[in-house]
Image (tube, grey):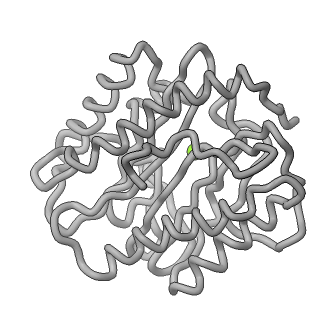
Amino acid sequence: MIYLKTNDEIEMMKTAGKVVGSILYELRETVRPGVSTKEIGDYIERRIRGEGMEPTFLGYYGFPASACISVNEEVVHGIPSAERVLKGGDIVGVDIGATYGGWVADAARTYAVGDVSRKAADIISACEASFFEGLKHCLIGERLGDVGHAIQACAESRGYSVVRDYTGHGIGQQMHEDPQVKNYGAAGKGVKLMKGMALAIEPMINEGTYETETLLDNWTVVTADGKLSAHYENTVVITDGEPELITLDSREA
Ligand code: MG
């Protein structure tokens, strides 16, 4: 069941999204060599609560933290840890959600830690580029298959594979609602986009195989071959005109 959001509901989501986007922008400074993923997670939780919002991820299906922080070959759902200290050359995906008055916004970025290899920098930029290729199709009359196809075509043209085991999703009063938003697929297929849809679009792309495994902590998802992975996500609202990116800080442009 796909819930179309009213303007008032979208305003609530935008309030949450503004905080999410702002925090992800601030992390450009926070994420650096010598910082543990727990310190980053704690910063995120303080910032969300400081705005009078709830960290959506904390306790979600029992997840133990307010952010998913995934380093290098970790794809998604990494648990912040005091033992995991970032070093120059790492790449780190940070995924966060905030709930305001019962309405959720969800977004992720992948950051370079210090100086990174050309390959590491490229997978980050390719992931972001694939999101924006998909976004071009977030228009009334297009279909989810058009979005996924554009993401996949962009990522694969740059030599990366698209993760199949995890996808984007509708979002609203629940973090995960219908429809599923695949980062791959056939143009012209799937659900038609309609005004008032809110979608978390989140390509996860890998340097090698798209296959993944889950670690024994039952959360951390890694690439099956141990090669790099990148993640980029925004909450997107479908309108009469251009789609609205409610989690992209204006300073990021
Ligand atoms: Mg998401």
Is 85 displayed left or right of 71 in the figure?
A: left
Image location (x, y in percent) of residue 86: 18, 54
Image location (x, y in percent) of residue 215: 43, 54
Image location (x, y in percent) of residue 224: 48, 71
**Ligand 1, what quadrant?**
top right
Residue drawn at 68 percent across, 36 percent down: 171
Q: Is residue 131 visible?
A: yes
Q: Identify the residue at the far front of this view.
A: 241
Residue drawn at 18 percent across, 39 percent down: 82
In the picture, which quadrant includes the N terminus?
A: top right
Is 147 displayed left or right of 55 in the figure?
A: right
Residue drawn at 64 percent across, 45 percent down: 244
Residue drawn at 43 percent across, 30 percent down: 19
Q: What is the quadrant of residue 139 in the picture?
A: bottom right
Q: What is the quadrant of residue 135 in the picture?
A: bottom right
- Residue 12 vs residue 209, the one in the foreground: 12
Q: Can you say whether 238 is above or below 151 in the image?
A: above
Is 126 displayed left or right of 201 in the figure?
A: left
